[in-house]
Amino acid sequence: MAPFRTLACFLMVTATMTERIFNLVVPLAHKATAMRTRDTSGCSREWSGAVSPLIGYGLRQGDVDSTTGRSTPPTLTMPGIRISTTATRTTTRATRAAPAPSADQSERHHADFSFEELVQAYLDCRKTKRNKPSAIEFEQNLERNLCQLNDEMQDGTYRPGRSICFVITRPKPREVWAADFRDRIVHHLLYNRIAPRFYAAFIADSCACIPGRGTLYAAKRLEAKVRSITQNWQRPAHYLKLDLANFFVSIDKNILRDLIAARVSEPWWMALAETILFHDPRQNYEYRGKPALLERVPAHKRLTSQPAHLGLPIGNLSSQFFANICLDTLDQFVKHQIGARHYVRYVDDFVLLHESPQWLNEALARIDAFLPARLHAKLNPTKTILQPIERGIDFVGQVIKPWHRETRKRTVKAAVQRVRTINAADLFETANSYFGLLRQADHSHHDRALLANALRKRGHCIKRDLTKTYRRAA
């Protein structure tokens, strides 16, 4: 029963399991024998004692704590947690030693993580996925599923499951892959362990999928660099904007594996990274949507059209993280080999600034030669732009112009059109999301006024400073 107590106490400390009901019981203390208690979920491993001082929170009055041999005081409860006092059946089973791995495989198959890390990965994963069907199904037997996943990770039998494939149409048709909820937990487990060592090496101009470095960070950083190179718009300068062609579906997994191995020296974690990296979701997936939608995605942009060694599924945390590892090679080349002082990248879009357009053309030629040779990637020639800065730089949905940043015009137009036509049930959340998006630009009053007028025509009240709307009174 130790896994149940450890899991329950860990979730109490985090104060997030406000809706779960735990049926807990601690077996009576017994003499040391070759037998030990085993919970009905099948967990049989010894867990860390890091939270052993809190185990008493799961006991009923009069129960005996097997770790101390003492009778427990009245049950302690914590705010937001309901604990059932109904006894749960337990079973006993003789333990059997697992066969020892061979010497050359012992390190690779020795799991180097704690149960608490797995629980934390689950908590991170469910933050934005709790209402998804796979998440609901997983939580129906939360303790059993976590223990089973832990056992598979510990004995090396874990294999990724079925993925869901669907197509989004905004802003353009794109193929998206969603891993099963339990696989997303494993992605977070790997990410939580190895991401910090990579982030420490990333340059500050690398944005996207990094904590604190979203679209607003990228827009503000580019604006600061523009003001720096133009001395607050007093001197002329030029910008070179580049985009990688079909980036996610053209990533070479073999190159990426070598880049990961350069910073992940632990055999077990490297093996887990390879399991996630080389998993081919096309071998076991379910397509959800109309077949006609899939046909709208160009063949060269589909993961299903690529060879097995190319492409990462868009939609997984692991893919976003691995993409940053891959493009860090480009960042280091641009900053240290080319010597670009003013450079910002957001995923596969990046901008270089310089006073001389000739210098930018030379940089373009060097980048164009570097990408296929080192990363087997290439630039999209239709999205290569070299212009004076004063014409405005369209980047991450905002346009940096002299003295201000504004939201892209087509984004504003799409926002107004959507609040005019969206159904009433979704209008409140959608409108406030657009208000939040428009507020990121420092020159947005006119755009927010357009959105507010569209909402007023539908009978909604708007806050005086044009920053939010309120639910329409019934």
Image (cartoon, helix red, strand yellow):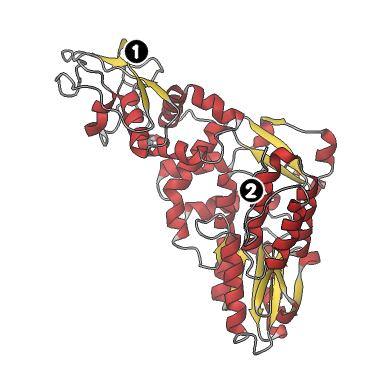
Which amino acid type is marked by label 2?
A: Tyr
Q: Tell me the quarter of the picture where residue 24 sits.
A: top left
Q: Residues within 10 Å of mark 1 (few under 14, many from 20)?
A: few
Q: Look at 73% across and 32% down and name the residue there.
A: 287
The residue under label 2 is 470
Image vertical order of residue 295 relative to residue 61, above or below: below
Image quarter of the C terminus: top right
Image vertical order of residue 158 relative to residue 248, above or below: above
Q: Look at 44% across and 43% down and name the residue there.
A: 269
Percent x, y of residue 336: 54, 74
Image quarter of the N terminus: top left
Residue 408 got which mark? none
Decide if residue 329 is in sight here.
Answer: no
Q: Nearer the viewer, mark 2 or mark 1?
A: 2
Image vertical order of residue 327 relative to residue 116, above or below: below
Q: Residues within 10 Å of mark 2 (few under 14, many from 20)?
A: few
Q: Is residue 464 left or right of residue 121?
A: right
The Cα atoms of the two marked residues, 2 and 1, are separated by 45 Å
| Front one among 203 and 103 | 203
Q: Look at 57% across and 57% down and name the residue there.
A: 324
Label 2, secondary structure: give it.
Answer: loop
Q: Tell me the quarter of the picture where residue 377 sits.
A: bottom right
Mark before the other along the chain sequence, 2 or 1: 1
| Front one among 149 and 425 | 425
Percent x, y of residue 466: 65, 60
Decide if residue 261 is in sight here.
Answer: yes
Q: Look at 77% across and 33% down and name the residue there.
A: 289
Percent x, y of residue 199: 47, 59
Q: Is residue 403 left or right of residue 38?
A: right
Which amino acid type is marked by label 1?
A: Thr
Residue 86 got which mark? 1
